[in-house]
Image (spheres, grey):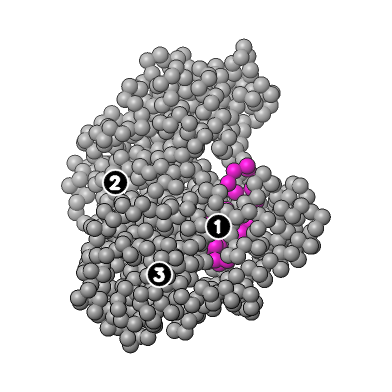
Amino acid sequence: MSYCRQEGKDRIIFVTKEEHESPSNAELIADDPNDPYEEQGLILPSGDINWNCPCLGGMASGPCGSQFKEAFSCFHYSKEEVKGSECIDYFRNMQECMQKYPELYPQEEENSAQTESSSEPESAAPAEGSASPPENDSSPGTSTAEPTSPTDSQTAS
Amino acid sequence: MLKCRTVWKKLAPLARSSSTVCRQNVRRAVLNNGRTPAQVPAAHMSTGPAGGGRENQLYALLVGAACLGGGIYVCTSIHLLWIALTTDEPVEAAPVEAAPVVEEAAEQPAAAVVEETEPAAAVVEETEPAAAVVEETEPAAAVVEETEPAAAVVEETEPAAAVVEETEPAAAVVEETEQPAPPVAEEAAEQPAAAVVEEGKTCKHRGDVAPVASKIPSHARYLLIGGGTASFAAARSIRARDPGARVLIVTDEPDLPYMRPPLSKELWFSDDPSVTETLRFKQWNGKERSIYFQPPSFYINPEELNSAENGGVAVLTGKKVVHMDVRGNKVKLDDDTEIAYDKCLIATGGVPRNLQVIERAGEEVMSKTTLFRKIEDFKLLDKVSRNIKSVTIIGGGFLGSELACALGRRSAESDLEVIQMFPEKGNMGKVLPEYLSNWTTEKVKKEGVKIISEALVKSVVAKDDKLEILLKDGRLVKTDHIVAAVGLEPNVDLAKSAGLEVDSDFGGYRVNAELQARSNIWVAGDAACFYDIRLGRRRVEHHDHAVVSGRLAGENMTGASKPYWHQSMFWSDLGPDVGYEAIGIVDSSLPTVGVFAKATAKDTPKAATEKSGTGIRSESETEDTAVSPVASSTPAPPTVGHKDDYGKGVIFYLRDKVVVGIILWNVFNRMPIARKIIKDGEEHADLNEVAKLFNIHED
């Protein structure tokens, strides 16, 4: 049973779980998907990359930011049939840069990586190239998401 | 896919530093409120079949839903590349031919291709083997092989391209990659060339300022004054949008940029006795990290700022900007060095206020008083509190209450007496409605803190190696050390020389909705009194605000022209029963509507904490048995019905019947909903209906 109380200017309501199970009739304003000021995801409505997306976790601003951007842009805008096939040098540049900063981009021991990789859908990769462009990735960063996601694979430093 | 993982792992550490990540603390993880309610636009976990598709599923698998879209993106591309390279078909960028390659890969050798991840790793991991692998695919090999020598050759010959690289790398790259031609060689050539040109420039600069020590660059395209969170966030933002950007941070602190919240929060609850040296703490996800946003290797040396190939972020520590010449676009440091800038951010934060009665009380009192803000203050208070019998915190706000709880916990292990006094009736009295403030005060007492409310300090004197605090109502408190946590004075020292306006109500530099003070000057963080289009003129002293406003300033310094739009939030925890997040204007003088879950014993946060066995406080500490005369004289808070347990709920703050602030009380991960309600700015007939959106009964 819910009950209300007023203490001066402050109103206090206690509610049970059951009482809050009925759908809310509060009306929210529909979000404008093209709100120019709203924080955008990885891919902007224009199709360009949002380099300031928090979802990039500082990749674009770090010491290898230039290399990362080159590689990523190359891939994103790649018109090749095998998307990104022309970008390997950019990715190599990025790797070379990262190797100069082991503290910032720690090398992963291959063992743990292997075990984990076994859980991935093996059939996933081959079809990717043609069918679903990775633009879908924009969803992770969209909206006002608080960065509360469990970032399991992250190490402390 | 191994490759993907490797790349991802490399990306990961940087993800950490998107600073709000640290906002969840240990206990929050313990409470395991990981599930986002359905109303939230499935932010990072878009594994749903509808929109996501494979990428997202893969992504969730890979990353466990960290929102690093880029990670998977990169992975995918590398993987595809690898498929291309390991097939026997010729791949040389001929679109028509490439198609069958993929097809084929998908059909027969597919399994093999995907399975054999080992060589893939080799390819991109180490560049040398990469070349080797590539060689096997004859035609492609030729291309790739050539690039390296080509780079070497062109390096010396093409200065023209350098200009492009230097100014607009992103755009340039995009353009280039569009062409199927071998942009690779060109690109490779550009960078060294750029370096050459840059160096020439540097020489000139050095020539100009020859007499002055060459250590400090005479010009910085982006100059950030202050080395705190807002500055760091701005540096990030600038670098992301202008990748070759040269950013110089000037700070009078001796340290590289670090986050302050752990200084009054997590660091006090560390098990590591050397925590004052390591400055590492456990995050909400159980992972440990440093309070420093980035290790030293992230930054470049100030003297190399203008010569580094891809720019970077340099930090000049221990230097104070003392004068600002807005017309001349330059500043002067305390050692008389001048630095010219193109764009400047003022993020000077503030200095802790002190009580006048303490300032006037003389040196001995001052020497036994801590004004808490920096790393050194944490270290000092940690040390002092181990060597004294009694500490008194003056102030009932965020900092005072958090420190009281932190020290209170220590009182359970030693015989340290922890007293907290403030003018309000209860803890957080300026923020929480009175009933909730009182309830919270009871919880803080359980943390071993002796609360003296409605306390106005009349005088402080040093006597017999002790400090005597006399209150206006005659009460006398004896203690060994005082921590004054009575607010922050925004640092507006540059206002005069720069001719910048200081807000007479809120303090701080007055800036517009885009955080701009003058054409090339922006202000962010504690020092900015900005115009919030939704909520009016404000100044906010919170970590997340420093992140949000610093980030926004960085965007605008690189031409975004965006107003303050994304509301910052803040959070605080006071012992195991009280944890909250808030957004907007939470001022206890406003009318409020609080909707609380009628809680059963099992779903209080405390129960959850105890159940998991990782509570941050020991269970032994209840109301202190040795009741001091002081504590006993504390006026009993107005009795709130005993049955009322404000375990979990949501509190709305109203101004003209519109919700302008929301506290999520022991309810976590609902901030997007709260932000949406503030953004809408609508009048709601029944806030209980709005409260339903928060699923306060759920974890």
Q: Is residue B35 visible?
A: yes
Which is in the foreground here, disc 3 or disc 2? 3
Secondary structure type for disc 3 = helix
Do pointers 2 and 1 mark residues of a single chain? yes
* Residue projecting furthest to the right: B211
Q: Is residue B565 visible?
A: no
Q: Which residues are magenta?
A: B227-256
| Type of amino acid at the residue the image marks with label 2 | Asn
On the image, numbered disc 2 is attached to which residue? B33
Do pointers 1 and 3 mark residues of a single chain? yes
Query: From the viewer's perspective, is A128 left or right of B189?
Result: left
Do pointers 3 and 2 mark residues of a single chain? yes
- Label 3 to label 2: alpha-carbon separation: 49 Å
* Residue projecting furthest to the bottom: B96
Front residue of B7/B607: it is B7
Q: Which residue is located at x 19 percent, y 51 percent?
A: A21
Q: Earlier in the sequence, mark 3 or mark 2?
A: 2
Chain letter of disc 1?
B
Secondary structure type for disc 2 = loop
Q: Which residue is located at x 60 percent, y 65 percent?
A: B309
Which is in the foreground here, disc 1 or disc 3? 3
Front residue of B614/B505: it is B614
Q: Earlier in the sequence, mark 2 or mark 1?
A: 2
| Type of amino acid at the residue the image marks with label 1 | Ala
On the image, numbered disc 3 is attached to which residue? B132
Q: Which residue is located at x 52 percent, y 66 percent?
A: A66
On the image, numbered disc 1 is attached to which residue? B234
Q: Mark 1: few, some, or many residues within 10 Å (few <14, many ≥20)?
A: many
